Image: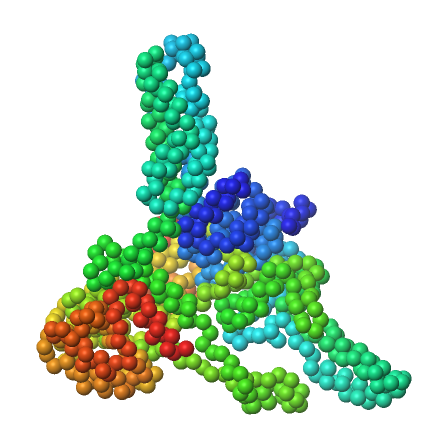
Amino acid sequence: MQENLHRFFRAARGAGVHVSPAESIDAMRAVTAVGLADRVVLRDTLLLTLAKSEDEKKALGACFDLFFAQPEPAQPQGAKDELQDSSPAAPPQPSQGAGDEISSNLGPLAQMLLSQDRNEIAAAIANAAGATGLSGIRYFTQRGLFSSRMLEAMGIQRLRDDLDALAESNPALAERLQAVTEALRETVRDTVAQALALYGREESENLRHEVLRNAPLSRIEPRQVEEMRALIRQIARRLRERYAKPRKRQRRGHLDVRRTLRRNAAWGGVPFLTAWKRRHRDKPKIVALCDVSGSVARVSDFFLLLIHSLHEVVSDVRSFAFSGHLIEVSEILEKKSPEEAMAEIMGKVGFGSSDYGSSFVDFEKGFMASVTPQTTVIVLGDARSNNLDPGADIVKRISERAKRLVWLNPEGRMTWGWGDSEMPRYQTFCNVVRQCATAQQLERAVSDIVATYR
Amino acid sequence: MADPRPSSPLASIAAVEAGLAAQGYIASRQIATAVYLSQAIEKPILVEGPAGVGKTELAKAIAAWRGLKMIRLQCYEGLDEAKALYEWKYAKQLLYTQILKDKLGEVLSGAATLHAALDQLHDFGDVFFSREFVEPRPLLQAMLEPQGCVLLIDEIDKSDAEFESLLLEILSDFQVTIPELGTIAAASAPTVILTSNSERNLGDALKRRCLHLHIGFPEQRLEERIVESRVPGISERLRRQLVAFIHDIRTLDLKKQPSVSETIDWARVLVLLQAGELGHEVVRDTLNVLLKYESDIEVAQPQVTTFVAKAQRQNIFG
């Protein structure tokens, strides 16, 4: 029982539920208290003790169902056996007398398979799984290896010898043994696949995420967009957790005389309790200008998604999108789902050829007032203005008004200044200039921006 | 490990469910399991869920059912040790200092040397920081309750993150440390219920020490039973229709979804208005009981007729 629970905890970790040793001890105690008789109660118990949020409950519930569905793969084999029983019903029966003495020559695995004791076979598979350390499976490439190891542990070698011997002495029985052996292989394969689903999830997910994090955002395939969105949300959650912590901290050494006197009025102004001055830290205010032309659009999409998922950390975000001209998009992003919002933004200003100069003019005319000395202005774009006026003087004025001006460029540093890139001209007015082509770079850039307010 | 004593009413999950039901709290299986486990392995329960699904009510029901005192600590931003745990009675200490000043001559008259006088003074110093001068606040009160009690820490997410750390000792060991007095362990482990509306994420350390129970909106059947037990005067017909209607309303995109407490309030209103069944006139007039935002009412208004018709059909098949 304990062994099984331990395996379940490992599977739970694979499913992304954080199970610490202390929690597993608690879960053990809880399970001892409720007993194992009722599966529904057991499920509730494990959900109560291990999962600590709604998402985790969902993941753990699914994991529980998968885990305890494990004995099932014995089913197809049973079904096949029955088929075999019904169709060539005649041959096994007459050979029974002869079969007895033959089967005494057979290895234990062959005997077990022929006796068709499903429970015994399931137990043997479980034992083999334990002996080969199946719960250590991590990657899908290990499937074949584990299958063959398990079969070996069960004594497939002896079974093969038996098959060869029987093929000459008793072809009918050999055929039957051949069929059940095939069924056994299939069951073992299923068991391994299931184990991979349970225990390997975390590793392969990590690997995939690692790849995804470093993939250029502008060139990911459409089928990966959803995954990337999930990844961005994860990044947003991480940033939130890191930066949403208390905004005020006592500044030691400065006595707040007024509050101290007020607080101690009850005992005649004798200062028993002291009050110290507090400094309220500002939350970041962000104004984001995003180029949504051509190849930069995708990056802008993810960037806007990230910025707008940071409500707890960032108090005030205003977003603007531009290619030929510039519009405010904050409201669209707040109200609609990411897909719809992006579609609408693209419909309004997207995919044009970019004109940084006139877009900056639009911004200065309409929204310059939104830039205050507390604001960080972030421009996301490749700075390729199709040889039109870059509007660098406006960028200079924005930079003077704002706390910081950050330019994120999806292109590599190598290409800045080549062709129609105006990057060097803008660069002089920016506090920070970064390349920002992958999810990882995006995370670092945003993290740094938020950190400057601490 | 505390075993569920056979004589205790907490012998099984079913017993918990029945006990709570006797207090008018209809618990789902998960809730009953959580309450049972919290006794069996002595762990606090952290209850999360939207407002008005009966998180606070659960604590009250447990207290009423087991005949224990309920001590409630309402959390808010800026809540600190002095208000939650204990405080020294400064005024009383001051008063006693004054008295001591007058008596100082008498007290010290017996002392032959300066050393002896100091020793005697030391004894007095200790007196000032004894239990005599401690004002117990809810958390300490809960520890001192000899029969045990139900300690409800309400809306923990409203408090500051530092306050959570203060709770850790109480939650895991049921004890409080007061530097001057030492550690005070609970006479009998209290049943601790923490509630949260998920306004902010709680720390892992806190979550780890608790059973995590999420109460969502109940299923239709369960909600009908809740209304039945809370509003006894309501006809079965109306109850069905009302609950079906509310479940439809919850499918809309609303700022604040109506929860169980709103369902009960609405049922009471309808009973008061002597509505035999759900008609869309009545619904339109009383929609403000159910929905608390003007914009939500605007969203729901056009759907009322459809939902009422659907709810009325409910009766035919149900």
Rendered position, A131 above or below A12: above
> In front: B278, or A306?
A306
Residue A397: x %, y % from top left: 23, 87
User: Can residue B300 be seen?
Assistant: no
Left or right of B147: which side holds A453? left
Rendered position, A172 above or below A269: above
Q: Quadrant of residue B43?
A: bottom right
Q: Quadrant of residue A329?
A: bottom left
> In front: A220, or B30?
A220
User: Can residue B209 be seen?
Assistant: yes
> In front: B71, or A241?
A241
Q: Residue at x 55, y 59 (%)?
A: B209
Q: Quadrant of the C terminus of chain A?
A: bottom left
Q: Residue at x 64, y 90 (%)?
A: A269
Q: Quadrant of residue A436?
A: bottom left
Residue B213: x %, y % from top left: 50, 56
Residue A342: x %, y % from top left: 22, 65
Left or right of A201: which side holds B37? right
